[in-house]
Image: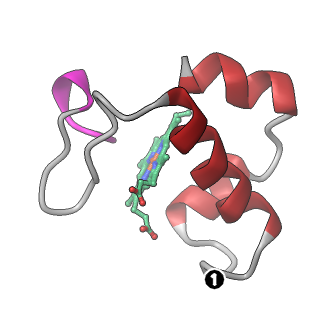
Amino acid sequence: MSHAPKGKGNATFPRLAGQHAHYRIKQLLVFQRTRERPERSIMKTVAHDLTAQNMRDVAD
Ligand code: HEM
């Protein structure tokens, strides 16, 4: 389970569907590069090893 079927989100996993790719990439960069979220939080772990190309690919 992650961002719910079709990315529409739920109480735990925020909506991704319909967001701009630019916004999704920015959020992945925030998770990867800042201390906005603690180490070992879910999306910090997911974003940890993504390259810029990976981020564009998953955001698309
Ligand atoms: C590569 C696939 C994924 C992408 C592109 C992605 C993208 C994102 C983005 C952009 C956000 C921020 C949404 C916002 O703040 O408006 C987010 C948050 C979140 N994602 Fe993912 N995600 C992915 C995989 C996963 C997986 C596999 C899980 C769970 C197993 C997960 C769990 C969460 C949770 C719990 C949040 C809220 C985290 C927080 O605000 O601290 N995501 N995700």
For the point 22% across and 62% down, the residue is: 12
Nearest the camera: 16 or 41?
Answer: 16
| Residue type highlighted by circle 1 | Pro
- Please tell me in which quadrant of the rendered image residue 18 appears: top left
Report the span colored magenta.
Answer: 1-7
Nearest the camera: 32 or 18?
Answer: 18
For the point 33% across and 41% down, the residue is: 2
When the figure is inspected, residue 60 is found, relative to residue 24, above or below; the finding is above
Please state the horizontal and vertical placement of residue 43, each as a whole percent of the image.
55, 57
When the figure is inspected, residue 5 is found, relative to residue 41, above or below; the finding is above
For the point 66% across and 57% down, the residue is: 45
Magenta-drawn stretch contains 3 = yes
Horizontal side of 43 relative to 4 (left or right) equals right
Please state the horizontal and vertical placement of residue 53, each as a whole percent of the image.
82, 22
Q: Residue lying furthest left in this view?
A: 11
When the figure is inspected, residue 3 is found, relative to residue 31, above or below; the finding is above
Local SS, label 1: loop
Magenta-drawn stretch contains 49 = no
For the point 45% across and 31% down, the residue is: 20
Horizontal side of 8 relative to 59 (left or right) equals left
